[in-house]
Image: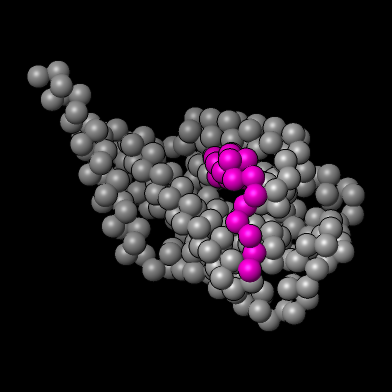
Amino acid sequence: MPATTSSAPHGALRTLLWTETKLYLREPLTTFFTLALPLGLLLILGNAIPGFRDPDPSLGGERVVDTHLPVMMIVLSVMISAFSAIPAALAVYRERGVLRRMSVTPVAPRSLLLTQLLLNLATSVVAVILMIVAGALAFGTHVPGRFPLFALTFLLGVCGLFGLGLCLAAVVPSSRAAGGIGSVVTFPLLFLAGMWVPRELMPDILRKIGDFTPTGAFGQAMRDAWAGATPEALHLVVLAVWAVGATALGVRAFRWE
């Protein structure tokens, strides 16, 4: 009997995860913005701008398509999941009373939170694979040189941004507001990450500010690891602090009703 009782929540969690996956795949816009859009931008920008395929002295002789462009597309994909997909989905469930009704089922409401994080983590992993494969096939870029450090940086960055996404989900008044508020947060963080102006070309003050943001540290550390270098300790520490702090704050502040 104890074994049956303890296995029931796990079975319900698996069912919930499978159900959420099917619902996620039925939303073509979510898949487009998290996967197709970053992939399309990588291929279009890499092919349309000839200078992106030439060695750039400001990037230490690297081409823009070697690490900068694919890493920025990965950051973009993760941020769309963190600041759009997760807050919107949880806001819809809160509005419809799904979380309140789940409290009387074998699966606690927090299980829905976990499934959303796991589902979007899987999407982010797919985005990384797409950028690596597309970059290699289209531009001859190499695979990440320090892959263990690259993977660690990726996980820390995802946890930090998803934690901020939970914080956003805790304060958005409705699912409609989630997209607008998410955009307000997304664009400044993308700028500090080097999306439009590479960090190497930024004024020192902006680059130093970016070092302490989750996106600035995330993008630079992944670029370093991809190029075969060791990410700066500062960036890894910043990512770890954001990962722990933002996730803890997001879980604590999240409203179930």
Where 248 sits versus 14, above or below?
above
Q: Farthest residue to the left: give it.
A: 1
Q: x and y percent of residue 172 in the render? A: 51, 48
Q: x and y percent of residue 94 in the render? A: 37, 46
- Frontmost residue, 147 versus 98: 147
Residue appearing at x 78%, y 73% in the figure? 54
Residue appearing at x 59%, y 66% in the figure? 136
Residue appearing at x 53%, y 30% in the figure? 248
Where 122 sits versus 63, above or below?
above
- What residue span does the magenta drawing correspond to? 140-160
Residue appearing at x 56%, y 60% in the figure? 132
Q: How many marks?
A: 0
Q: Farthest residue to the top: give it.
A: 2
Position of 21 with respect to 57 (left or right) is: left
- Asked if one can make out residue 76 in the rendered structure from this viewpoint, the answer is no
Q: Farthest residue to the right: give it.
A: 204
The color scheme shown is one colour
Position of 188 with respect to 133 (left or right) is: right
Quarter in which the C terminus is drawn: top left
Q: x and y percent of residue 209 in the render? A: 81, 45
Quarter in which the N terminus is drawn: top left
- Asked if one can make out residue 145 in the rendered structure from this viewpoint, the answer is yes
Q: Is the magenta stretch mostly helix, strand or loop?
A: helix
Please check the rendered image and state whether residue 163 is part of the magenta-colored stretch, yes or no. Answer: no
Please check the rendered image and state whether residue 144 is part of the magenta-colored stretch, yes or no. Answer: yes
Which quadrant holds residue 181?
Answer: bottom right
Position of 132 with respect to 205 (left or right) is: left
- Frontmost residue, 138 versus 167: 138
Q: x and y percent of residue 238 in the render? A: 70, 35
